[in-house]
Amino acid sequence: MSIIEIKNLTKKFEVEGHTITALDGITLSIEKGDIFGIIGMSGAGKSTLVRSINYLEKPSDGRVLIDGVNLAGLSEKELRKQRSNIGMIFQNFNLLEQKNVTDNICFPLEIAGIKKKEARQRAKDLLKLVNLEDKEKAYPSQLSGGQKQRVAIARALATNPQILLCDEATSALDPQTTASILSLLKQINEEMGITIVIITHQMSVVTEVCKKVAIIDSGRLVEEGFVDKIFEHPESDAAKELISGREVKYTPIERLDTERKIRIVFQENSAYEPIIANMILKLQVPINILRADTRNVNGRAVGEMILGLPGRHDKQGEIIEYLKETGIVVSEVSDNE
């Protein structure tokens, strides 16, 4: 069952007499209880998209439905009530520096008219959830980046939302802290059943926790599906660029003197086998390993390599056939990748 439906969403801005199209006909459906990733490079339009989900940005065209309710048809009062069902966390935390941790978490409850005693008990429960029980009286300036984000998550959960939007929530954090925050988000999703939408430019974030992903490029939806399938078989240039972790035109692979390159993805049943070594011994051909990496994809360790093949076309075919027979996912790498 879809909890978020985005239909033909378009957002245009007028800038110094010019019309800028930030979103161009986006259609997406996000299932209840999912952890859904929306990924794209800087300027792709993903932050505009997430702000359209709770109508902080009102679309120029198209519709956003939350649990079947069209946000365009709501009054300002009804829209504010609907937003209380949609929590949001940001890259820069957005905490109130003059308020301590407990008061920051209580702030949205105060706005909602919740009694102080009830609000403080809710804050206490949430601090336990995010493992910050000993920081209830601390101020944001006394916290690390990871602790600030945990407070921001607790505050976003204060009103018992069904949806949690995360706009580049881990971009300002180091890798270890990012992993702990993603683990917390996964725990919240599993224990509370909250639908989580993660906006990011980091494929590692998506592969770590998301079940499905949408890839946005220049305001358009260019690819969508299950994370593991897109990781194994990226079709769009944007997906390939994001998986490579660098801009395609600058990758050193294209500068290597190799006639043909392939990308291979190791499945679970082949991750511990010396497949490349066995292949070289059996086929008696040299193989160039141009790049190798291991990713966490939905809790599985998945390996990938870029291989440079020898010049003889008959040997290239033998290599590809051998790899496919062993259960390896094989795809071509073009010269500009």
Image (spheres, rainbow, N blue to C red):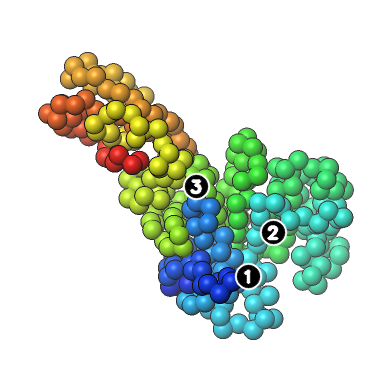
Q: Is residue 132 left or right of residue 33?
A: right
According to the picture, the residue beneath numbered tag 2 turns out to be 156
Q: Splitting the image into 4 quarters, where does residue 110 fall?
A: bottom right
Residue 104 location in percent, x, y? 80, 57
- Label 2 or label 3, whichever lies nearer to me, is 3
Quarter of the figure that contains the C terminus: top left
- Label 1 or label 3, whichever lies nearer to me, is 1
How many neighbours does mark 3 have within 10 angstroms: few (below 14), some (14-19), or many (20 or more)?
Answer: many
According to the picture, the residue beneath numbered tag 3 turns out to be 206
The answer for how far apart the CA atoms under marks 1 and 3 are is: 24 Å
Secondary element at image label 2: helix
According to the picture, the residue beneath numbered tag 1 turns out to be 56
Q: Residue at x 46, y 63 (%)?
A: 219
Q: Is residue 11 left or right of residue 90?
A: left
The amino acid on which the numbered mark 3 sits, given as a three-letter code, is: Val
Residue placed most toward the observer, 248 or 104: 248
Secondary element at image label 3: helix
Question: Relative to 36, does residue 13 appear above or below in the rendering?
Answer: below
Question: Relative to 208, does residue 126 appear above or below in the rendering?
Answer: below
Q: Residue at x 46, y 40 (%)?
A: 246
